[in-house]
Image: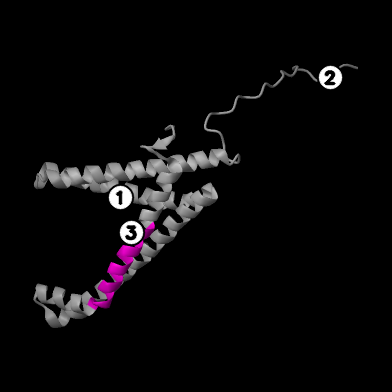
Amino acid sequence: MVKPLEKAGCLELRTAGLIIGWLGVFGSILYFCIATVTLVKAVKEADYVAAENGEVARSHDQTESAVFVLGGTLIGVLILGAVVSGLLIYGINQNRHSMLLPWLVLSTFSLVLSYFQLLGALFDFVAFSHSFPLFFYQVISTGLNSYIYYVIYSLYTHMKMDSGKGRVLTPAQAAAVPLQPAYSNYDKV
């Protein structure tokens, strides 16, 4: 088992967790605004994409539908991200370790996808484009995602242990059980 962090660089774990949570909320709000503006202009986007493909009349409706579906999905994910980041902030402020679990679960999926992207970038670097900047960016991005996850997981572990309801990370000593005689006391008459 990996030992939890005591500090995140020069910051306390709670401070680092609050910063991560607020960055998540502000990032979700910013991307939400961008996605909403994109959805409002979906017809113009569909015209642009259809004209780029050379099939203006037939693919316009398909492109517009695809923009609406992808934009709606993106908005749903962004709302979920803002709520989960808000729960992270609330959990840290109220010292409730269970409120950090949604962030950890969502970030686990994000971290797994980040590792798959790293493998894809490595394959692309070795086999095809030999684009070192893209590979280097993916290494830094995956490393940063892993460290942020580790910081929040360490905070979760400390909060759970401090609450007194959590289990101790070291196994408990086995209780001494007195040896029983092989015969029963009722055998003697």
Q: Is residue 178 visible?
A: yes
User: Which contiguous range is marked in magenta?
Assistant: 25-42
Left or right of 6, for residue 145: left
Q: Quadrant of residue 181?
A: top right
- The residue positioned 27% from the left and 73% from the top of the image is 37
Inspect the image, locate mark 1, and give the three-letter code of the amino acid beneath it. Leu
Left or right of 112, for residue 6: right
Eyeballing the image, is 12 above or below 72?
Answer: above
Residue at the disc numbered 3? 27
Residue 93: x percent and y percent?
51, 51
Left or right of 93, for residue 34: left
Inspect the image, locate mark 3, and give the three-letter code of the amino acid beneath it. Gly
Eyeballing the image, is 67 above or below 117?
Answer: below
Instruction: State the residue lying farthest toward the right.
Output: 189
In this view, the mark in front (3 or 1): 3
Q: Quadrant of residue 77?
A: bottom left
Residue at the disc numbered 2? 185
Q: Which mark is residue 113?
A: 1
Eyeballing the image, is 132 above or below 61?
Answer: above
